[in-house]
Every structure is written in structure tokens, then in C-alpha cells.
Image (cartoon, helix red, strand yellow):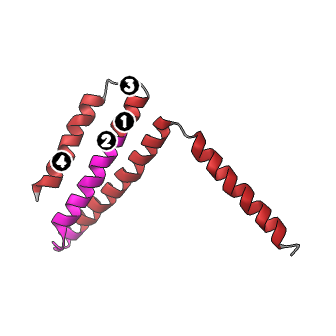
Amino acid sequence: MKRLFPLLLISLILLFSSVISVNAESEFEMYLSDFYQKQEKASKILKEIETDLKDGSRDRVCARQREAASYGIEATESLIKAFKSNGTETEIENLKAGLDKWRELRDYC
């Protein structure tokens, strides 16, 4: 019982500190984090597709390409929201052009 109490106390402190840090994240940081996560997923899938194609495998290329493009679209939309929440409007047109490229990639197959 004496060992259980300190472990429980430490667990509660870690739990509350993680909740507090999540709440402290600004809207800009939240969108930016979402962008990085989804962009990473899209890049990983596209690299896997590239490797498979170099090895001669075309297994589920279109389905995976659409999945990567969906992540790319979501990532770019999050980045647009991040810039808007931060008051930066200068790069929005370039990001919208990038969004169109992701849509082309999705619709290509």
C-alpha cells in the first residue's frame, strides 16, 4: 500500500500536467501541430509508394495515393487555418495553389 500511494500521486500529477499543457496550446499551435502530423503521414505514404514503384510493385497505388492526398489536403487546410488565426494573409494564395495540387493528385487515379 505504501508503494501504491506514491505511484498514484505521480500518475495524477503527470495526468494533470499533460491536460494543462494541452489547454495552454494556442489555436495557431494546434493547427500547426495538426499540419505537421498530417503532412508527415502523407509524405510517408508517398515515399512508400515511390519505393514500391521502383521495386516494380503497383499494389494498391491509387488507393494509397488518394489516402496520401487526403492527408495532404487536411494538412494544408490546417496550415491555412493556422495562418488565418495568426493574422497572416500573405501566403494564403500560395497555400490554396498547393491545396489544388493535392486535389489533382487525389483525383489523378
Amino acid type shown at disc 4 = Arg
Local secondary structure at mark 4:
helix
In this view, the residue in front, 35 or 85, is 85
Calculate the distance from the C-alpha at mark 3 to the C-alpha at mark 2.
14 Å
Calculate the distance from the C-alpha at mark 4 to the C-alpha at mark 2.
12 Å
Q: Please state the extent of the stretch shown in magenta in the rendering.
A: 52-78
Calculate the distance from the C-alpha at mark 1 to the C-alpha at mark 2.
6 Å
Amino acid type shown at disc 3 = Thr
In this view, the residue in front, 89 or 19, is 19
Q: How many neighbours does mark 4 have within 10 angstroms: few (below 14), some (14-19), or many (20 or more)?
A: some
Image quarter where the N terminus lies is bottom right
User: Disc 1 marks which residue?
Assistant: 81
Local secondary structure at mark 3:
loop
Calculate the distance from the C-alpha at mark 1 to the C-alpha at mark 4.
18 Å
User: Disc 4 marks which residue?
Assistant: 103
Amino acid type shown at disc 2 = Glu
Asked if the residue at tag 2 contacts the one at tag 1, i.e. Cβ–Cβ closer than 8 Å, the answer is: yes
Q: Is residue 4 left or right of residue 12?
A: right
User: Disc 2 marks which residue?
Assistant: 77
Image quarter where the C terminus lies is bottom left
Asked if the residue at tag 2 contacts the one at tag 4, i.e. Cβ–Cβ closer than 8 Å, the answer is: no
Q: Which of the two discs, 1 and 4, labels the residue nearer the N terminus? A: 1
Determine if the magenta segment contains residue 58: yes
Q: Main secondary structure of the magenta part?
A: helix
User: Disc 3 marks which residue?
Assistant: 88
Give percent across and percent down for residue 56. 16, 73
Q: Which of the two discs, 4 and 2, labels the residue nearer the N terminus? A: 2
Residue drawn at x 35%, y 57% is: 41
